[in-house]
Image: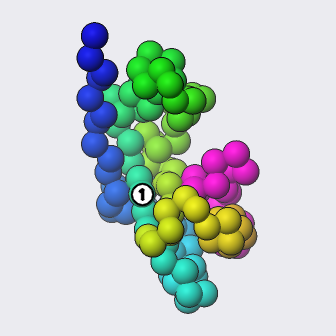
Amino acid sequence: MSEPREPGRLTRLCLLEPEFRAKVEALLEWMERLGFDPEVFESLRSSKRQEWLYGVGRTHHLRRRPVTWVRYSRHQAGVAVDIVSRRRGWSDPRFFGYLARGAGRYGLEALPHDPCHVQIR
């Protein structure tokens, strides 16, 4: 049996809810002023992609641990984004420390167990 094909990611900020988008843009600008290189890895998420991500480690990619713990994500409502370092991806703890700090500064929240994830409070 073949693995289900991964649905594509969306990265455009214009797909987000306007109030949330404005806060994310301010956060990204703040990070850049501090010398970081933030990049939106994923913005709005389709239901099909969310189901695929939920299936990782459960119904496919059986040698990997689960990617998400929920069948519905705030990404699907346009009020969550994943932000990573353009050069270092997920491997810069300092970047994610500042991302969490900046999220709070702009009325957003970062999830401790998913450091790239920023969502509306």
The picture places residue 118, in percent across and down from the top left corner, at: 59, 56
- Give the residue displayed 70% in from the left and 45% down from the top: 113
Name the element at disc 1: strand
Q: Does the magenta run of residues contain 111? A: yes
Q: Does the magenta run of residues contain 87? A: no
Badge 1 density bin: few <14, some 14–19, many ≥20, Cα 10 Å: some
- Residue 15 seen in render: yes
Q: Is residue 22 above or below residue 119?
A: below
* Lateral position of residue 46 relative to residue 74, left or right: left
Which residues are the magenta region? 102-121
- Give the residue displayed 68% in from the left and 71% down from the top: 94
* Lateral position of residue 113 relative to residue 90, left or right: right
Count up the numbered dots.
Answer: 1
- Give the residue displayed 26% in from the left and 17% down from the top: 2
Locate residue 30: give its quadrant: bottom right
Q: Residue furthest front?
A: 63
Q: Is residue 89 above or below residue 37?
A: above
Question: Which of the pair 113/60 is nearer the observer?
Answer: 60
The picture places residue 27, in percent across and down from the top left corner, at: 56, 73
The picture places residue 51, in percent across and down from the top left corner, at: 41, 25
Q: Quadrant of the N terminus?
A: top left
Dot 1 amino acid type: Phe
Q: Which residue is mark 1?
A: 41
Question: Which of the pair 70/52 is nearer the observer?
Answer: 52
- Give the residue displayed 44% in from the left and 16% down from the top: 59
Locate residue 35: give its quadrant: bottom right
